[in-house]
Image (cartoon, coloured by chain):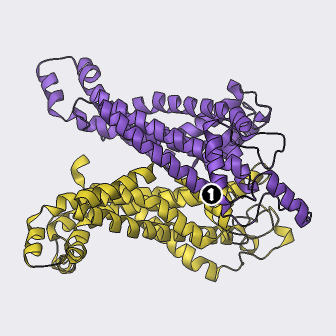
Amino acid sequence: MFSYTIKRLLIAIPTIFIIIAAAFFLMRAAPGSPFDSERAMSPEIRAMIMAHYGFDKPLSVQFLEYLKGLFTLDLGPSLIYKDQSVTKIIASGFPKSIVLGLSSLSLALFIGVPLGLVAALNQNKAQDYSIMAIAMAGICIPTFVTGPILSLVFGVYLGWFPTAGLDLGRMTIETMTLPVITLALPQIAIISRLVRASAIEVLGSNFVRTARAKGLPEIWVLSRHAMRAALLPLVSYLGPACASLITGSVVIETVFQLPGIGRNFVTSALQRDYPVVMAVVILYAALIIILNLIADILYGVLDPKVTYE
Amino acid sequence: MSLISTPNENAKLMEKSAIAGRSLWDDALVRLLRNKAAVVSMYVLGFLVLLAIFGPLVWPHKYDTVDYDLVMAPPTFKNWHIFGGDQQGRDLFVRLLYGLRISLAVGIVATMVSLTIGVAWGSIAGFIGGKVDAIMMRIVDILYALPFIFFVIILMVVFGRNIILIFVAIGAVEWLTMARIVRGQTLSLRKKEYIEAAHAAGLGTLDIIKRHIIPNLLGPVIVYVTLTIPAVILAESFLSFLGLGVNEPMTSLGNLISIGAKEMEIAPWLLIFPAVTMMITLFCLNFIGDGLRDAIDPKDR
């Protein structure tokens, strides 16, 4: 177990390094630069600006300096917002994205798990079919459709929630409800399908039959024996779930104009604000790697059948 | 439906028997045709595909003709503007057909890209095994951890919006799972007697992969392909929604949805028609994929 963790961590380091390198060189390969503006710039001034940001040095030197900066959490200045450092931009957006992601994940688990269990216990009955139909809808309807429709219905027509205006950075229950629900919907669908499939398998397995045969009340069979085994596959889904929540948050933050880093990423990418884009990609990649690692280790701890060599 | 097939069906199956065991495919077909959701989905999807291919040819309006009287006009039967006009005064119905065309094309081409890479990678890794397998699958593991959609976004920003790039980039993102499935399947196939027989007969590794491994992989691969197409369509719409998809005046479903989302308070039909079209398409593809999975690999039922 311990050596497995170490091994995984050792793989994570080159992975993150590859991500940093890929992001860095891709962005530098871009034709056009953030300083392309409407006004023509004299070559001298352009050279001075390039020198100011260190763009005149050889690429390898720039890369090494960037790595050095990363270790000290100095991610350089933003090229578009002159008074902001990248670290500052990330520090202001990241907590909001985290709150959005964690609330959506909790909501998805809170609703998705019971739905899946109910469907499995009523396999091939009306409840099962209706839950699976809803789940299919949740998978098929992308968040950038549900987001606008929810805000049209509940925000514009019914006026229950503000539709936008989170730019001030205030996060209240009213402003966060719709984004959290929208982001959680596809995850609710996936989680309920996952739980249903694994619960059906577990309910048909020998140890559940044994538990029933020895006369345990059904509720005990379910809570003591079936539940634990049925929810195991969910643990290994948590890593990918977080990854898709992160991707989803990019859309959600754009639709609802939340000032998180997902939206920062899109606007910066469109403006070629390289340092911000790279920082967000690196942060997300590191996050996904770490979460996957945690999910895998957790899985090993919970499932006695799994041994890591 | 009876399990005994007619002579006519038998003849068709005989043709297929060169690819895989006859009775398995026979059973799978029967199971698939018994799945109502999948059958209905196939009809609906077929209709949508025909509409996307031939609709624009016969429709009286062009996708890029601007008519100022039509700016955000509500749907009307007058003059065949049945879905109304968009924000620039173009007929929404024909734009929707073009959008569907692009989305389906992206779905199919990008899936083919991922299929080719994934099957080649997975079957080689699984068949050769040992060190090669370990290294190849470690690479897949590493790539798995990358937030690929962000790299696609960077690619679109760096190299400009380009439909070929969308195809390749999304395809290159989606091949990893395919490679894993194929490799797992290959590992178990490798031990089979007929592979041993082929070895004994002196067939080379590449020939064995081509003749024996890949045909036997078809089942799980077909299932995964049908489930990849909707995922790819979603990925493309995601890019289009962020403003990184195909170029104007061309359009895709995601692009139409993103415009619709901006105008929904004044002209909700601009959002509703593309969104519903996309949902129907994705529903059908997912139902067919699920149906195929249950038909080919019925152990979960």
Asked if residue B215 lies left or right of residue A84, the reply is left
Residue A86 versus residue A273 in the image, above or below: above
Left or right: residue B95 versus residue A306 is right
Q: Which residue is mark 1?
A: A60
Mark 1 falls on what kind of element? helix
Instruction: Please name the amino acid that badge 1 sits on.
Output: Ser
Residue closest to the eye, B228 or B260 = B228
- Residues A244 and B63: in front is A244
The chain letter for the residue carrying disc 1 is A
Residue depicted at x 50% and y 45%: A138
Q: Position of residue B166 (x, y in %)?
A: 58, 66
Any idea which chain is the yellow one in this picture?
Answer: B
Could you say where residue B70 lies in the image, as x and y percent from the top left? 81, 68
Q: Is residue A76 visible?
A: yes
Tell me the quarter of the picture where residue B128 sits.
Answer: bottom left
At 76% from the left and 71% from the top, the residue drawn is B78
Q: At which x and y percent is residue A163?
A: 75, 37
Instruction: Give neighbour class at mark 1: few <14, some 14-19, many 20+ (Cα, 10 Å).
Output: few
Task: Return the x and y of residue A274 as percentages of the image width and height.
Answer: 70, 52
Residues A307 and B33: in front is A307
x 23%, y 53%: residue: B298
- In the image, residue A70 above or below residue B157: above
B195 to the left or right of A128: left
Task: Find chain A in the image and tell me its colour.
Answer: purple
Residue B239 in view (yes/no): no
Identify the residue shown where x is 38% and y is 40%. A8
Indicate the quadrant where residue B250 lies.
Answer: bottom right
**Left or right side of B228 for A201:** left
Q: Is residue B210 above or below residue A150?
A: below
Residue situated in front as seen by the camera: B48 or A82: A82
